[in-house]
Image: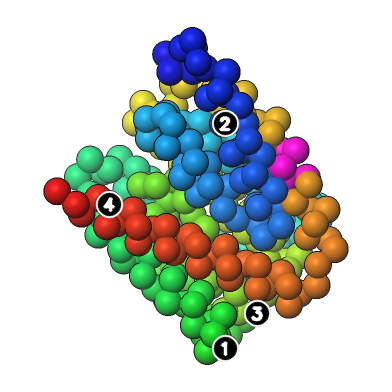
Amino acid sequence: MEIMTAPDSALLWGFAVCVTLLAGVIKGVVGFALPMVMISGLSSVMPPELALAAMMIPTVLANLMQALRQGPRAAWETIRRFWIFLVSGGVALVATAQLVPMLPSDVLYLLIGLPVTLYAGATLAGRALRLPPDPGARTMTAIGALTGAMGGVTGVLGPPTVAMLTAQGTEKRDQVRIQGVIYGLGALTFLFAHVGSGVLRVETLPLSLALVPPALIGIWLGFRIQDRIDQAVFRRATLLVLLVAGVNLLRRALVVMQP
């Protein structure tokens, strides 16, 4: 945390708050991307481990706010509907969080970023992949495990989940709530996993807590925008953010692969 108490720390704090506010707005509009934006932005001015710790508490609380927007009953129905996805994702997340030093992150980024980019690009080009409303246990298990594995390493759960929900043609309010429940449970699992790994500790906790207000203000502003756009605009905005997420994952894979 010395970096946040250095003589020029005011600029770092201001940048961190702006990045978190922007991440919250985007999440409020499309239902995901807060960890992705925070990690991408914060890691450009601080060590990746500190950036990872910084986004943990804001992510948990933002997802709680999102999951409960239509009330506890709707959130519980989402848990019942997606329990296979949640269980497989939770197991994969805990396993990969503890094995981060042993995993080839460039390969993981590539395996996830490539299909996400192709899916978002093809859908925006009018060649959409469609899934039935109930894709079956095997498909849900596979997508859940992929999402959890990605989350354990990067803290980002969004792209595979959003691709699944968009391919199912999920209505925007349902999609945002479902994402909030899935990401919220995943974020809690991720938080406890990295308390165990030592990423979130006494020294890094204050930064994470300090970024909670801008995250919640941002998501509240994003909700206001989301309420004013129709389903078609929401779907296109979601796909554009998903495309950016996929391209960013490919970029990270190429950066890691460089000697």
Mark 3 or 2, nearer chain start: 2
Q: Is residue 54 above or below residue 126?
A: above
Which of the two residues, 46 or 148, is positioned nearer the viewer here? Answer: 46
Q: CA distance from mark 1 to mark 4?
A: 31 Å
Residue 157: give x, y in percent of width and height. 49, 55
- Residue under the point 65% across and 52% down: 27
Stretch of the chain drawn in magenta = 216-220
Mark 4 or 2, nearer chain start: 2
> Which residue in the protein does label 2 denote?
15
247 left or right, relative to 167? left
As shown in the figure, which amino acid type bears the numbered disc 2? Answer: Phe
Which of the two residues, 127 or 161, is positioned nearer the viewer here? Answer: 127
Mark 1 or 4, nearer chain start: 1
Q: Identify the mark at residue 169; answer none if there is no mark.
A: 3
Mark 3 or 1, nearer chain start: 1
Q: Which mark lies nearer to you, 2 or 1?
A: 2
Q: Identify the mark at residue 126; answer none if there is no mark.
A: 1
> Which residue in the protein does label 4 denote?
255
Q: In the picture, residue 227 is in which quadrant?
A: bottom right
Mark 3 or 4, nearer chain start: 3
Residue 92: give x, y in percent of width and height. 37, 54
